[in-house]
Image (cartoon, rainbow, N blue to C red):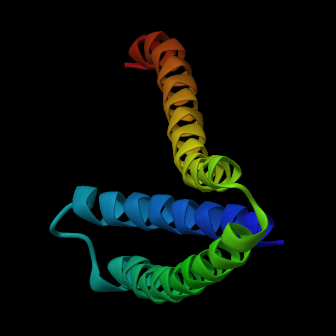
Amino acid sequence: MFIGDLDKVVSLLLSLSGRLLRVETTLDTLDPDTEHHERLPLLEKKRQLMRQLSEAQDLKDHVDRREQAVSRVLARCLSPEQHRDYSHFVKMKAALLVEQRQLEDKIRLGEEQLRGEFSFPEREKNF
């Protein structure tokens, strides 16, 4: 159960961080003359994502405390080598989730760039 919860919380943190970054990027790229009523929904979305990210970090802290408790119990049941393997697995699980998300984001960005490249010649014909 702990490993499943770790997976879910890390995925949630990564998802919220990515969404927050996209909203901040959109806000940064808006024309300074953009009307306040157009900017307001993005600012509200940013506040909402920041709250959710804070709550997700609280969940991660709770999962970290659970991991310590599970580790203490397992230290009594496993050999030192098995316990080291378990600890390594837990650390690698989170690191691999982060790496997987980064690769997925790079793939998505590359696909978006490819779609953008193929649409540029069509745009030039229209000008």
Horizontal relation, residue 61 to residue 7: left or right: left
Q: Nearer the viewer, residue 110 or 31?
A: 110
> Relative to residue 117, is residue 105 depicted above or below?
below
Which of the image's four quarters has the N terminus? bottom right
Choose top left, top right, bottom left or bottom right for residue 22: bottom left
Instruction: Give coordinates of residue 71: x percent, y percent.
Output: 64, 71
Q: Residue furthest left?
A: 32
The residue sitting at 45% across, 20% down in the picture is 123
> Relative to residue 13, is residue 96 depicted above or below?
above
Q: Nearer the viewer, residue 75 or 4?
A: 75
The residue sitting at 44% across, 17% down in the picture is 120
Instruction: Give coordinates of residue 51: x percent, y percent.
Output: 46, 89
The residue sitting at 28% across, 84% down in the picture is 36
Horizontal relation, residue 75 to residue 123: left or right: right
Choose top left, top right, bottom left or bottom right for residue 43: bottom left
Q: Residue furthest right?
A: 1
